[in-house]
Amino acid sequence: MDDGGSAGAVLSGPALPAILTVAETGSTNADLLALAADGAHEGSWLRAERQTAGRGRQGRAWESLGGNLYASTLIRIVPTDPPAASLALVCAVALAETIGTLGCPAVTIKWPNDLLLDGAKLAGILLERSGDAVIAGFGVNLATHPTIEGRQTASLAGRLWVHSAAELFDHLVSDFARWLGIWRRDGLAPVIARWEGQAHPLGTPLVANLSDGSSLAGAFVGLADDGALRLRLADGAVRVIHAADVFVV
């Protein structure tokens, strides 16, 4: 469905899960956060052809160029769910599977949920929470890629990619629902196993910029049982990291 207006004009108040596309909005994440407060149901999705106020992690602006994917979905956390933070891994494996199924198997995952193509950032995922509502926002560079200071970026243009943002979105809705079900039914173990199977190799050198301003350099040695990053430092000790901005060296 393409309403051509703002998300708020399409989704309002408690409703059955909806899968909607609009021509333009400020931020699909911001729209769904507002709608979640109004009682929107889990499984609601919003895709925008263009965002005017897209954002990434740590408050960074996300440049929303034409032809790319900008979409968000709503998850309602229940007491029996695994830790909500681990939804970052669910999002990553679902999106990586979708892109691979559509013909680009070379995508790798960088902790916790960036997708890389030849070492450059292809996609980002932003999770935001309010109460029991978690909004997962997906941005994928299909036709063009933004310039991000200090980071390499890539798009799928010119790589025999023949799929539109709408096609990618349709597949992602299905793949995400399946992985969300696995996460709820079977726990984190199968999600972590798939995540590690799509990640850069064990031993890959990484740098983690921590929230206190310090940095840690080490080798990737997989994920902890709760999905945290494990880094082997130069002295052989393994450090478990739950929050950081991580770069492949």
Image (cartoon, rainbow, N blue to C red):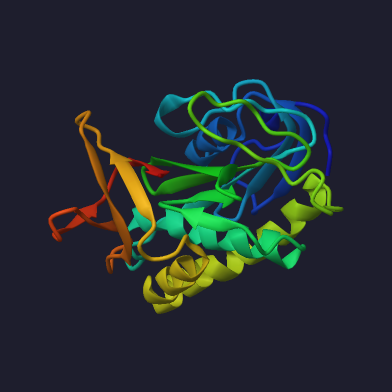
Against 175, residue 51 (above or below) is above
Q: Residue at x 40, y 30 (%)?
A: 58
Q: Quadrant of residue 147?
A: top right
In this view, the residue in front, 126 or 233, is: 233
Residue positioned most to the right? 162
Against 180, residue 145 (above or below) is above
Residue positioned most to the front? 234
Estimate the x, y position of residue 166 in percent, counting from the top left. 80, 48
Against 236, residue 47 (above or below) is above
Q: Residue at x 57, y 28 (%)?
A: 62
Q: Quadrant of residue 97?
A: bottom right
Estimate the x, y position of residue 32 in percent, counting from the top left. 57, 38
Estimate the x, y position of residue 245 in percent, counting from the top left. 36, 39
Against 194, residue 67 (above or below) is above
Query: Is residue 228 shown to the viewer in this render?
Result: no
Instruction: State left or right for residue 222 relative to residue 169.
Output: left
Instruction: State left or right for residue 198 relative to residue 58.
Output: right
In this view, the residue in front, 38 or 186, is: 186
